[in-house]
Amino acid sequence: MPASQLLILDQKQIQQKIDRIAYQILEDNMDEEEVVLAGIWERGYRVAVRLQQVLEQIARFKVTMMRIDLERESSRLMAKTNLQEAEWAGKVIILVDDVLNSGKTLAYGFGLFLNTPHKKIRTVVLVDRSHKIFPIATDYVGLELATILKEHVDVVMDVEGQEDAVYIS
């Protein structure tokens, strides 16, 4: 870790945040038969996998994983998923990302579901930086963090040789 990085969350704290979010998801969806965790590749998907692991232990509903690959640099919505539309239609969708900065990534993620009927869509972020320029609200948040625009929040999860952590630089 370079000296310019400050540890914000360690491995234990990350797991505590994920556990709490999983229980909030459970509470909000007690009567559901299935919930689709739509993780934005790559780090959002990693958070979604962790949520899936906890939910499978505590929830009665089925958890279906969905991977969303977004073209982040595009000025238009360009995305691919590993599921067909019929596999998420009419279900609860929980859109998952690691860090909410401007809201563009989550807004693009929402775009995938606009023309498909669903029960509800909720959002999960591990860290909310509160610099939104898109009208995005987060439903489940691990940590709200006041930062300046020049600072960068880096989530390290499931990276070989590195312990899970959240850094700010």
Image (cartoon, rainbow, N blue to C red):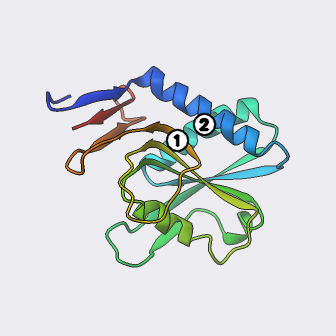
In this image, 85 relative to 132: left or right?
A: right
Q: For the N terminus, give its image quadrant.
A: top left
Element assignment for label 1: strand
- Residue at the spot of label 2: 21
Residue plotted at (76% across, 62% down)? 119
Residue plotted at (41% across, 35% down)? 157
Where does the image place residue 89, in percent across and percent down from the top left? 74, 68
Where does the image place residue 131, in percent across and percent down from the top left? 35, 54
Residue plotted at (54% across, 25% down)? 16
Task: Find the residue positioned furthest to the left.
Answer: 3
In this image, 157 relative to 66: left or right?
A: left
Tell me if mark 1 has few (under 14), some (14-19) or many (20+) residues whose alpha carbon lies within 10 angstroms of its own. many
Residue 117: quarter of image: bottom right
Where does the image place residue 121, in percent across and percent down from the top left? 66, 59
- The relative height of residue 119 versus residue 74 in the rendered view (above or below) is above
Decide if residue 144 is in sight here.
Answer: yes
Decide if residue 162 is in sight here.
Answer: no
- Residue at the spot of label 1: 141
Which amino acid type corresponds to the residue marked 1 in the rendered image?
Answer: Val
Where does the image place residue 123, in percent across and percent down from the top left? 57, 52
Element assignment for label 2: helix
